Image (cartoon, rainbow, N blue to C red):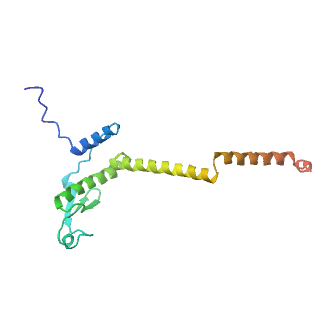
Amino acid sequence: MDSSVPSRNKPPEDPDDIAVDARQKQQGRKSAPTVRLKLNEADIRESFVKGSGPGGQKINKVRSCVQLTHLPTGIQVQCQDARDLISNRAIARKMLAEKVEFHLRGKDSRIGRRVSRVQKQKAKSRSRSRKAQQLRDGVGEESHDEEEEEKEQEQEHEVTHAHPAEGKPG
């Protein structure tokens, strides 16, 4: 056999993973491991329900809303993002896989990393706005130093001006 022919035993790459890697390379980041959680079809209960919301008579007649339940964890997902059933099934499966992964892996999952990154950004923003507000109010580090100096001066004043009779036992 010719060794230049690629092996057929190699699993096909997920197009979403390739897109994520390309996006990270464009942004100059190292690519994180993109291991997706594979759900067993026997663990999923799928049902099709009538949709709700805007759309008029069509949404009330057609069962294009997909509802998936992961039986071992009890996590439910409902999707009616697209107009057709096939697209909604695919979207719902991705949503379910992300939720189950977050449930099992916590902060190490894709959603967990995204949530922690957003929390860090919000904390940084709060810290910046708090510092800016303190500077606007004139309550910066300088005022804290002045308050400490005033307290020390008051304590020294109390010690030097203490009544001589108070310190002696009677």
Query: Quick check: 152 left or right of 92?
Result: right
Residue 113 place in picture, x, y as percent:
37, 46
Q: Quadrant of residue 10?
A: top left
For image coordinates 44% across by 50% down, the residue present is: 119
Q: Between 101 and 26, which is closer to the camera in this rendering?
A: 26
For image coordinates 33% across by 51% down, the residue present is: 102
Query: Would you say residue 32 is visible in this rendering?
Result: no
Q: Quadrant of residue 3?
A: top left
Give above or below for 85 relative to 165.
below
For image coordinates 64% across by 51% down, the residue present is: 139
Query: Quick check: 26 left or right of 59?
Result: right
Image mark count: 0
Q: Residue furthest left?
A: 1
Residue 79 place in picture, x, y as percent:
25, 61
Residue 49 place in picture, x, y as percent:
21, 67
Q: Quadrant of the N terminus?
A: top left
Residue 115 place in picture, x, y as percent:
39, 50
